Image (cartoon, rainbow, N blue to C red):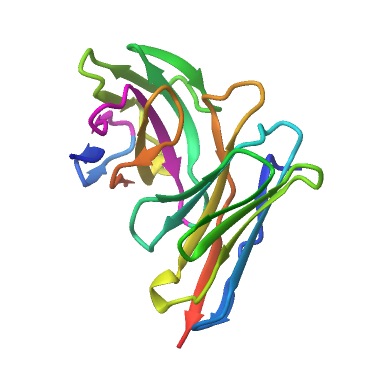
Amino acid sequence: DAGVTQSPTHLIKTRGQQVTLRCSPKSGHDTVSWYQQALGQGPQFIFQYYEEEERQRGNFPDRFSGHQFPNYSSELNVNALLLGDSALYLCASSLAGAEQYFGPGTRLTVT
Amino acid sequence: QKEVEQNSGPLSVPEGAIASLNCTYSDRVSQSFFWYRQYSGKSPELIMSIYSNGDKEDGRFTAQLNKASQYVSLLIRDSQPSDSATYLCAGPLNSSASKIIFGSGTRLSIRP
């Protein structure tokens, strides 16, 4: 049973650039949530997707956007990257928003 | 008050002893909680969920939820060096069960 997968593992971008991160949920899960985790902090909720729609959003600017596809996989897009966007980006999947299981994360470095 | 608060630690416990990790929450958080373990450089791993008042045991782990006092705890019995990690407490907001709020985590170190 495949767990949550994310790609890429690591990414280095320059300020002002755009980035797309990808997530495939655990088999049987229909909900995908995205989190940003800075060093020494807990994950911060970015948004959640269910039935291809954004169901809930955290306190992140519009530069952060996402999408969910019919196969439940999801993308996180960040435009106009800032140095402060450097973090571990985590995708978590669940069934109907219950217990969430995390993928390995994407480490984004903005220089 | 933050929605979910944890002591950042580090909490140092001798091998074989009981490690006790605590988390308090505000009125804005719904009363179901999750405990995650996160090793350095890795992603969080779900280890316990608790939805009702009282204790829930799973192997060496016991989660305790006290709704009257608004705290949730995780006990680890017979602590092993492999239990050394950061433990994150999380719960959904009352206003939106989709939005899970995490504490900043407690670093646990098990000394041999």
Residue B112, picture quadrant: bottom left
Q: Which residues are magenta?
A: A16-39
Residue lying farthest to the right in this orientation: B68
Residue nearest the viewer, comparing A80 with A88:
A88
Q: Position of residue A39 (x, y in %)?
A: 46, 55
Q: Position of residue A101 (x, y in %)?
A: 36, 40
- Residue drawn at x 49%, y 75% is B79
Q: Is residue A87 left or right of residue B31?
A: left
Q: Position of residue A106 (x, y in %)?
A: 28, 44
Residue nearest the viewer, comparing A26 with A42:
A26
**Position of the N terminus of chain B by quadrant:** top right
Q: Position of residue A51 (x, y in %)?
A: 34, 11
- Residue drawn at x 35%, y 51% is B43
Residue lying farthest to the bottom in this orientation: B112
Q: Is residue B24 left or right of residue A39?
A: right
- Residue drawn at x 24%, y 40% is A3
Residue A86, picture quadrant: top left
Q: Is residue A36 left or right of residue B69?
A: left
- Residue drawn at x 50%, y 82% is B16
Residue nearest the viewer, comparing A56 with A38:
A56
Question: Image height check: is B100 above or below A41?
Answer: above
Query: How many numbered discs, if any?
Result: 0
Indicate whether residue B81 is drawn in magenta. Answer: no
Residue A64, picture quadrant: top left
Indicate whether residue A37 is drawn in magenta. Answer: yes
